[in-house]
Image (cartoon, coloured by chain):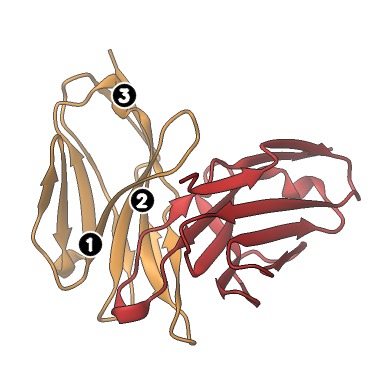
Amino acid sequence: NAGVTQTPKFRVLKTGQSMTLLCAQDMNHEYMYWYRQDPGMGLRLIHYSVGEGTTAKGEVPDGYNVSRLKKQNFLLGLESAAPSQTSVYFCASSYSRAGGAFHEQYFGPGTRLTVT
Amino acid sequence: AQKVTQAQTEISVVEKEDVTLDCVYETRDTTYYLFWYKQPPSGELVFLIRRNSFDEQNEISGRYSWNFQKSTSSFNFTITASQVVDSAVYFCALSDPTTSGTYKYIFGTGTRLKVLA
């Protein structure tokens, strides 16, 4: 099992450019999440998905869009990149809440994005 | 509102010392879960433990132990006889139910632990 993978690992964008970050998981998890990590601010949730075809906003969704067309993939898009979006982006997945439990998340290795 | 506070931004200890990382949470829910994750210098996030609100027993795993106290809304993490390999950023997280019955998580801002040889 590869677990959670993210593509690309590094990227440098100019202000105004667009890009898509790809997250893939092979654990048949229902839930998937996108976070950004900035110094001193921990992990902040951008968007999440609780199943194929569904997405929801997290804490810091502005400037980002997402899609979950396939259960195993969760895409994060930046339509017009800004320097404030310079960050490390993490994707995570987890089992659903079936049975009432909250399960731990499995994280990808992260994507380091710089917007100049 | 759901909240996780890790007041210790950075801690430095000398190898073999014991160290405790604090985590204080706020929640309106009666059923909730707490988590700890480790982020070593390589950058990946590694799951350490999950604890539900109905289980207040302390847990020990090797040199790691966790103290969950509902009365003080705390879920503290102790490393005994610390080693250089324990140097990392440690995150505490809390389950955050959504109105649709699913869930997400709230993370603390993390504590950077430096273990000096």
Name the residue at the left extreme: B57
Name the residue at the right extreme: A16
Q: Which chain is orange in the picture?
A: B
Looking at the picture, how far across and down is residue B2, in whole percent?
40, 72
Looking at the picture, how far across and down is residue A100, in whole percent?
30, 80
Which residue has dot 2 on it? B6
Q: Which mark is residue B2?
A: none
Q: Give the letter of the chain under mark 3.
A: B
Q: Quadrant of residue A83?
A: top right
Mark closer to the chain start, 2 or 1: 2
Mark in the foreground, 3 or 2: 3
Q: Are marks 2 and 1 in one subunit?
A: yes
Depth check: give the residue in front, B21 or A22. Answer: A22
User: Which three-letter amino acid code belongs to the residue tagged 2?
Assistant: Gln
**Horizontal side of residue A109 vs B14, given as left or right:** right
**Residue B62 seen in the figure:** yes
**Looking at the image, do the residues carrying marks 3 and 2 touch, with CB atoms under 8 Å apart?**
no
**Horizontal side of residue B22 vs A50, given as left or right:** left
**Horizontal side of residue A79 vs A67, given as left or right:** right
What separation in Å lies between label 1 and label 3 (alpha carbons)?
24 Å
Q: Secondary structure at mark 1?
A: strand
**What color does chain A have in the rendering?**
red
- Which quadrant would the N terminus of chain B be assigned to in this image? bottom left
Which residue has dot 3 on it? B85
Which residue has dot 1 on it? B51
What separation in Å lies between label 2 and label 1 (alpha carbons)?
17 Å
